[in-house]
Every structure is written in structure tokens, then in C-alpha cells.
Amino acid sequence: EVQLLESGGGLVQPGGSLRLSCAASGFTFSSYAMSWVRQAPGKGLEWVSVIGGDSVTTFYANSVKGRFIISRDNSKNTLYLQMNSLRVDDTAVFYCVKTIWSASYRFDPWGQGTLVTVSS
Amino acid sequence: QSALTQPASVSGSPGQSITISCTGTSSDVGTYNFVSWYQQRPGKAPKLMIYEGSKRPSGVSNRFSGSKSGNTASLTISGLQAEDEADYFCCSFAGSNTVVFGGGTKLTVL
């Protein structure tokens, strides 16, 4: 069974930084792209970033480009999201998602999410 | 990267069929056959229900079906059940290695 467990969320001041982690199990982690998708409180879903299985390719939403960095450590089956220059409107639950990218652009399954709150 | 347009809410009675629309543009839904649909129950993570427009993952009921016409994709749920009450989100590839989600539709089973 695929399991994705996010961690690292919390309260941070505007302009601050935070690193999210996602521990994966139940599948060959290095064979799959992985994404971060976020959901502001009471709002819809927003794709944030995707990384290929070999870390060669990374793509970002315009809203986070230049501020967020996605990475992975296949030896630890772990996905990361380094978030810098955080803004109040980055407040959201961040989901780690196993991704089929260029062949299908689908997200399945999703972790339970970790809440990031940006506030002074 | 403008969000796809979904109705804020739809409702139906048990046993009925409902359809949720997802309207994009010729830059996303209209050009690519990469529309997916996600179900999100309160307090839970989203779950993939339909991908590549009309394909169902293993384990998803055949009461769920997807289609597309022009710039609008649709999710149809037949034989509505109480357990179908949830938020539903569409998603489409939008070119330039990006995807865009819809704003979500709250389904109420009366």
C-alpha cells in the first residue's frame, strides 16, 4: 500500500522559510514523479511543483517560482519542498502526491497534508 | 494559469444522476485530453476518480464517468448515493509543463 506522510508544517512569519518533507513507502519511489499541491483554508486546490524521478526535471507554478525549491532523496524515499520568502497567501495545507506527469498528468494517491500558516 | 470554472454547488437525490461541468479554454481543456477529477470528503485528502478525461482508476465505481466537449469537461455521477457527498475538483494540463485546477464543486445529496 502506498503511504505518503508529510511533515514540517507550522507557523512562520512573513518573509520566513520552512522546509516540508514527505516520507514515501509502498512503491518504487525513484520510478515516479512527485508533486506538491496546496489548498488554502476553505479554498480550492493549487498545483505547486513537480519533480521527475531522477530529479533532472522540475517545474513550478508561477506563484512560487523563484521562492520554492522542490527536491528529493531517492536513497531515503523522501520528497522535500524548501519554501523561502513566505507570504501570508502561502498559508495552506500542502499535500505530497505521487504523480504520473508527462504521460497522463494525474495525481494519485495523496498524503494527508501538512498545514503551513504564514502570519505575524 | 487561470483556474478552470466549476459551479460552486450541485445537488441531487439518491438514485438520480448529476453532472459537474469544468470549463477551461483552448489552452488547456480544449486542446489536451488530460483532464482528471478528484473527490474530497470533509477533512480528507483528495482522491483520484477520473483521469485522461474518461478513464477510471481501479477501485472507483463505474457510477463515475467523464467526458469532454470543446473547452468543457464533465463528471457524471449516476445512481447518486449519500457517500458521494463531497467536493469535486477538475484538473487539466495547461501546456508549458503546468496544470490548473478548477475552483471545486460541492455536491450535496438531498
Image: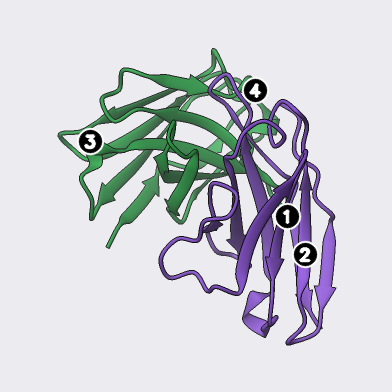
Q: CA distance from mark 4 to mark 1?
A: 27 Å
Identify the amino acid type marked 1.
Answer: Ser
Q: Which residue is mark 2?
A: B19
Is label 4 or label 2 in front?
2
Identify the amino acid type marked 4.
Answer: Ser
Q: As rendered, which of A101 and B53 lies closer to the eye?
A: B53
Identify the amino acid type marked 3.
Answer: Ser
Q: Sequence order check: which comes first, mark 3 or mark 4? A: 3
The chain ID associated with circle 4 is: A
Q: Sequence order check: which comes first, mark 2 or mark 1? A: 2
* Chain seen in green: A
Identify the amino acid type marked 2.
Answer: Thr
Q: CA distance from mark 3 to mark 2?
A: 38 Å
Q: Which residue is mark 1?
A: B74
Mark 4 touching mark 1, by CB under 8 A?
no
Q: Which residue is mark 4?
A: A63
Q: Colour of chain B?
A: purple
- Residue A53 location in percent, x, y? 29, 30
The chain ID associated with circle 2 is: B
Q: Which mark is residue A30?
A: 3
Q: Is residue B57 above or below residue A45?
A: below
